[in-house]
Image (cartoon, grey):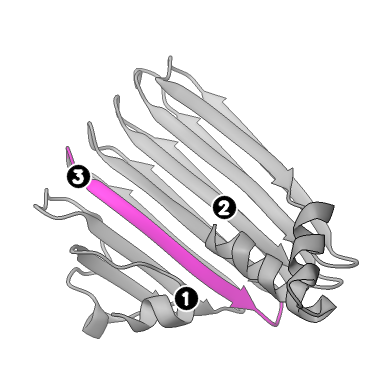
Amino acid sequence: MSYMWNEFNIKTMRAETIVYRDGVYCPDLSTLENKPIDKKYDLPVHIIYVGEISGENNLSVNITCQDQQVVLSVNVKNKKPAFLNIFIKNTGKNSEIRGTVFLENNSELKYNCVAHHMCKNTAILIKNKLLAGKKSVSELSGVAIIDTNCPGCASDVGFVAMADEGAKIIFKPEQRISAEPLSAEHSAAIYRPSDFQIQYLRGAGLSGAEVDLAMKEAFMSE
């Protein structure tokens, strides 16, 4: 699946795969069905969600087995108003899901990530990155839930955005922690290129438009 790197900057690996493109499950690119991960695999499970979205889109990730490593790679963009909901439930002791969600909004986008720890010693670590186009409107929500009697969990749902002129961004991070975690973090930040970075690229002969493109590509691939 080298095109995943060429088109979406997603690195593939030796893994069991669950692939979605433009919000649709792709059985020809997947080795697993889009259902709960209910058995332990020798390889990591790589969930890939890419393409262009519009309207309402939902991705559910349900880990019910122990000791399973899961990787989530999301890279989507929209030209029309869109909603994206990612629901993660981890009920598998010592199971971990970590990943990166790349969002490129050129219209109106509402994104919601729910990370629900339902067993002790589970991990859900999701980095969310937004590239907000000119005059776009983005609302990003994330909630980490650690249930009662589920100690020792590692939770991190973080947001960082790079905004173009006139873009509006609303962050809504939230935590609901009912047991002592191993770690529990959440964050929201706006990234802005430094004057030194801009001057360096202009000194290398790049035009203003080329500098903007280089900074956006660096932000998304960081």
Residue type for callout 2 = Asn
Q: Are marks 1 and 2 in contact (CB under 8 Å)?
A: no
Whole-percent x, y for residue 49 in the image: 42, 70
Q: Measuring 59% from the left and 34% from the top, which residue is drawn there?
A: 186
Q: Measuring 78% from the left and 51% from the top, which residue is drawn there?
A: 170
Question: In terms of secondary structure, where does tag 1 sit?
Answer: helix
Query: Total of numbered circles in the picture?
Result: 3
Magenta segment: does it hold 71? Answer: yes
Task: Report the disc number at residue 8.
Answer: 1
- Relative to 167, 187 lies left or right: left
Magenta segment: does it hold 159? Answer: no
Question: In terms of secondary structure, where does tag 3 sit?
Answer: loop
Q: Are marks 1 and 3 in contact (CB under 8 Å)?
A: no
Circle 2 is placed at which residue position? 128
Whole-percent x, y for residue 80 in the image: 70, 81
Compared with 86, 19 (above or below) is below
In this orientation, which residue lies closer to the viewer: 106 or 217?
217
Farthest top residue? 180
For marks 1 and 3, the one nearer the N-term is: 1
The CA span between labels 2 and 3 is 22 Å
The region drawn magenta spans 66-81
- Relative to 169, 130 lies left or right: left
In this orientation, which residue lies closer to the viewer: 123 or 55?
123
Magenta region's main secondary structure? strand
Task: Name the mark nearer the viewer: 1 or 3.
Answer: 1
At label 1, counting other C-alpha atoms closer than 10 Å, the crowd grade (few under 14, some 14-19, many 20 or more) is some
